[in-house]
Amino acid sequence: MTFRALSHPARRLPWGAVVWPTLLILCLLPGVLSRLVGPLSPGQPLVFDPPLWQLTLTHLVLVLLATAVVLLFGIPLAVAVTRPGREALQHLTETLVGLGQTVPTFAILALAVPALGFGWTPTLLGLILYGLVPVVSNGVTGLLTVDRHLLDAARGMGMSNWQRLWRIELPLALPVLLAGVRTSTVYNVGTATIGAALGAGGLGGPIINGLSQQNTVLILIGAVLAALLALSLDALLGLLVRRENPVPR
């Protein structure tokens, strides 16, 4: 009897991780998007100040900064409430964090303006509160689904609580946690468009200007770029999820 070595199929790059960022970059080239939507507004020259690439970069920085703060607070919070004997604190935390999505985002921003003023600060506050929910929920779910027998075995090997968390719990919960980060980031791309009304800039600017001027083309440009940015980030973060949780084909 002969044995044939089994080889795993090569991991192929998901098409979305190439297509969506490419389309986004093409639309940001000078004049490309204006030519595509120009027939919808004949005789109305489209001039953007700041340019579209700068609006997109501002939008991206807002989302990534909010995501970084969400991770900074969300992961330790998920770890803290999943320790043994903290079930009541876990339910309380999930309830309080869930208020970030129960209350409309515009209401959160409107309430933050009197205390924080206009600009990035109230916008980031809204993005953080809105983005905490999927990160904390997925983090709690991922940590609670770790096989207790593995933790008992690690305890029997003499591992400390910190070693069990760092070497076993977090690596096993990572795919679920990354899925929450992916959801949070995509949510906040859409939520950040509201920040333009508070002077934070970003791709909400063309949308708000289009609404005030009754210009469908401006609304379409802002919406298309925001959608492409959301799809690009979703596809790129999907690569991390696939890497941590590969699915055999």
Image: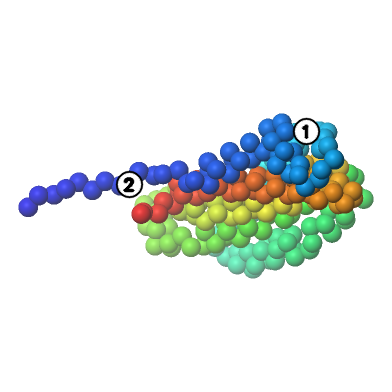
Where in the figure is residue 119, as x and y percent of width and height? Answer: 85, 42
Q: Secondary structure at mark 2?
A: loop
Tag 2 and tag 1, C-beta contact below 8 Å: no
Q: Residue type at mark 1: give it.
A: Pro
Residue 129 in view in this figure:
yes
Q: Quadrant of residue 134?
A: bottom right
Q: Residue at x 75, y 49 (%)?
A: 220
Tell which of 124 and 89 is nearer to you.
124
- Going by the picture, which residue comes out furthest to the left? 1
In this rendering, is residue 54 above or below 136?
A: above
Q: Secondary structure at mark 1?
A: loop
Q: How many marks?
A: 2
Residue 156 in view in this figure:
no
How many neighbours does mark 2 have within 10 angstroms: few (below 14), some (14-19), or many (20 or more)?
Answer: few
Q: What's the distance in space between the residues labelled 2 and 1, CA to CA?
A: 44 Å
How many neighbours does mark 1 have within 10 angstroms: few (below 14), some (14-19), or many (20 or more)?
Answer: few
Tell which of 198 and 223 is nearer to you.
223
Q: Residue at x 65, y 44 (%)?
A: 229
Q: Quadrant of residue 249?
A: bottom left
Q: Residue at x 70, y 47 (%)?
A: 224
Q: Residue at x 43, y 63 (%)?
A: 148
In this rendering, is residue 42 above or below 130?
A: above
Where in the figure is residue 21, as x and y percent of width and height? Answer: 59, 40
Instruction: Give the mark toward the camera: 2 or 1.
Output: 1
The dot on residue 87 is none
Where in the figure is residue 184, as x and y percent of width and height? Answer: 64, 53
176 horizontally vs 47: left or right: left
The dot on residue 51 is 1
Tell which of 156 and 183 is nearer to you.
183
Where in the figure is residue 239, as x and y percent of width and height? Answer: 50, 45
The dot on residue 9 is 2
